[in-house]
Image (cartoon, helix red, strand yellow):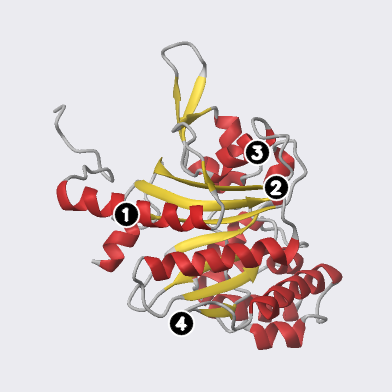
Amino acid sequence: MATRPIIGLDDAFGARARALRKLQGNLLDLFAEADYEEVIPPIVERPDALKSGAGRFLADQTVVFTDPAGAGLLALRSDITPQIARIAATRLLAAETLKLSYSGPVMLARPELRGGSRQQWQTGIECLGVAGSHGDTEVLHLAARSMLAAGFTKPVLQVGHIGLLKALVSGSSTDLATWTVLLRRRSPNDLLAEIEGQDLDCGVVDALLKFVSGEADQHWIEENRLAFNTAFQSAADELLTLVHAVGERLEGDVQLIADAGVMPRFLYHSGVLFAGYAEGVSHALLHGGRYDAMMAAHGRDMAATGFSCDLWAWLDASA
């Protein structure tokens, strides 16, 4: 029947629609006060523009269709960050530094959680052209302020670095995407099943088990920064520099925790990455990090970092 609902998609009206618009307005006002200018990209893009530098994580979540007007293959966006990268590399090419915000619907090919929604109202910021810990620090502060503005209590920002995992598994027969999925599950048994039969150093195996069990904290990173290779040391130093720079300077009761086991939501991050949590919420409220490599894939060598959240998930978490 034409009226049969589509699994994972729903209508919003009345109080729920008003609540979303209020939360959206509060966050966009917060971003504007921090000098982030709003951008409204189209919901449809060419598939290559959405997948550039994003790896297969984003490709697997992108709905592609043929345009009846003759424009060829088009795609419904599953993430807005690649669109910001395209805009920065084309329409805003003359600007050396860009601070942009956005808020709008995205569509996933399949829900991220069993029984979850395929529709999200993605809202976030992108800080472009500000390299190193300066840009990362600014974005972390805005992420913390966003959770506080939404009324979440005792927010926590867990900060990691994708370079740590890359350095450990560079000689593995398993690709990076698979490793990130395994570590995001936080299941030691699943990890051991993948490791079995591989020629990995026992020190690397122990480190991966620390990652997946949540034991690779700041103290562990400091103790093991020289234990593997120069790539691991470089990533560890970058992460520790950021943690020390932010320190206790986050406003409110927001806590910053170094955790080497933090994994990206999409595999376009190329450096520091983070996730936000709060008291009483069992899942991550926001994801962010550095994605310089995606900018290079779009043809512009530019530092880039940011974060995003799903406003529908925020409303459900605070209900």
Q: Earlier in the sequence, mark 4 or mark 3?
A: 3
Q: Could you say where residue 312 lies in the image, as x and y percent from the top left?
A: 32, 54
Q: Is residue 318 above or below residue 240?
A: above
User: Residue at the spot x=65%, y=84% of the render?
Assistant: 218
Q: Earlier in the sequence, mark 4 or mark 2?
A: 2
Specify the amino acid type for callout 3: Ala
- Direction right: furthest residue: 230
Check if mark 1's residue and mark 3's residue have beta carbons within 8 Å. no
State left or right for residue 157 relative to residue 237: left
Q: Single out the mark in the foreground, 1 or 4.
A: 4
Q: Quadrant of the C terminus?
A: bottom left
What's the distance in space between the residues labelled 3 and 2, CA to CA?
9 Å
Q: Earlier in the sequence, mark 1 or mark 3?
A: 3
User: Residue at the spot x=78%, y=62% of the render?
Assistant: 171
Residue picked out by circle 4: 253
What's the distance in space between the residues labelled 1 and 4, CA to CA?
24 Å
What's the distance in space between the residues labelled 2 and 1, CA to CA?
31 Å
State left or right for residue 27 relative to residue 226: left
Q: Earlier in the sequence, mark 3 or mark 2?
A: 3
Residue picked out by circle 1: 312
Q: Could you say where residue 271 lies in the image, as x and y percent from the top left?
A: 70, 61
